[in-house]
Image (tube, grey):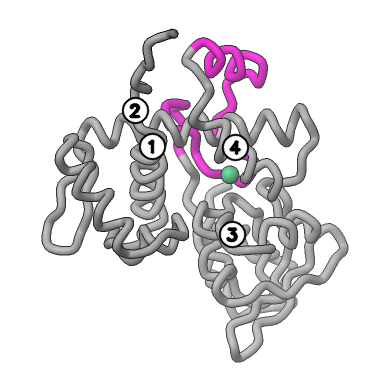
Amino acid sequence: MAEYQTPEFHPAFEEYCEAIWELKEDQVDVIQARVAERLRVSRPAVSEMIKRMQAEGFVTVDGTTINLTEAGQRLAERVVRRHRLAERLLTDILGLSWADAHVEAGKWEHVISEPVEEAINRLLDNPTTCPHGNPIPGSGYTPPDVVPLSEVEVGGQFTVNRIPEELEFTPGLLDFLEDATVQPGYEGEVTAVSPDGTVTVEIEGKHVGIGSFAAERILVTASPAPTDGTDGKEASSATASA
Ligand SMILES: [Zn+2]
């Protein structure tokens, strides 16, 4: 009988390091409650696992804030990189929907080996972001200046840059955004903002209402207002630089 080989890293450690890294990426406070929500596990389970990860040197805890150590950071970046590369492969080559690719990539990220990772990267010609626009660690990507969609004024033009990871975990949202062509690289215009913060955009000829939670998180590059002379009020509001 073959001797049992301890995996190089416990998959749960990978999941936790990834979740902590991505919460920080989305500028969410990294406390146990947020980790529990992200991973859909109980608070006692998180508390237990964080203790184990502290003992193994993956995290430190400062008051209520959880921080990755250098080892935790390395592990997280490896898993996030594999997740985002897998998403690209699953959508671009295999034709899966955004939502399906996100779920599948959550499994692939734990089993892709270094040579396979390199092969995927070669096949896809060194992609710099996942299909949702989130940077692939190690790809050398420098994001442009972006603002949340909620900050674009009515009549303002924008180009979708990024659907942050936080929104990938919001049930149903990826399908909605993909169907509505709210996808990186597509241009749109804000046509209305309702008092509850819902932003209505026109994109690819479709009018779509985006709730405040998503509108405050979807990142866009804003285009300068058109200078056709009919709107004399904002002559000096140029903020975007291509
Ligand atoms: Zn993604």
Estimate the spatial distance between the alpha carbons at disc 2 and disc 3, rounded to whole Å.
42 Å
Q: Quadrant of residue 34?
A: bottom left
Question: Which one is earlier in the sequence, the residue at label 2 or at label 3?
Answer: 2
Disc 2 is placed on an element classified as loop
Mark 2 Cα-neighbour bin, 10 Å: few <14, some 14–19, many ≥20: few
Task: Give the Cα distance between marks 4 and 1.
Answer: 13 Å
Amino acid type shown at disc 4: Ala
Whether label 2 touches label 1, CB < 8 Å? yes
**First in sequence: mark 4 vs mark 3:** 4
Q: Quadrant of ligand 1?
A: top right
Q: Secondary structure at mark 4?
A: helix
Chief secondary structure of the magenta portion = loop
C-alpha separation, residue under disc 4 versus residue under disc 3:
30 Å
Label of residue 14 in the image: 1
Closer to the camera: disc 2 or disc 3?
A: 2
CA separation, marks 3 and 1?
36 Å
Which amino acid lies under the numbered mark 1 shown in the image of this protein?
Glu
| Residue range (magenta) | 115-142
**Marks 4 and 2, how far apart in space?**
18 Å
Give coordinates of residue 23: x percent, y percent.
38, 54
Mark 4 vs ligand 1: CB below 8 Å: yes
Q: Is mark 1 within 8 Å of ligand 1?
A: no
Query: Measuring 37% from the left and 11% from the top, which residue is drawn there?
Result: 3
Q: Which numbered tag is attached to residue 218?
A: none
Give the farthest residue toward the front: 1
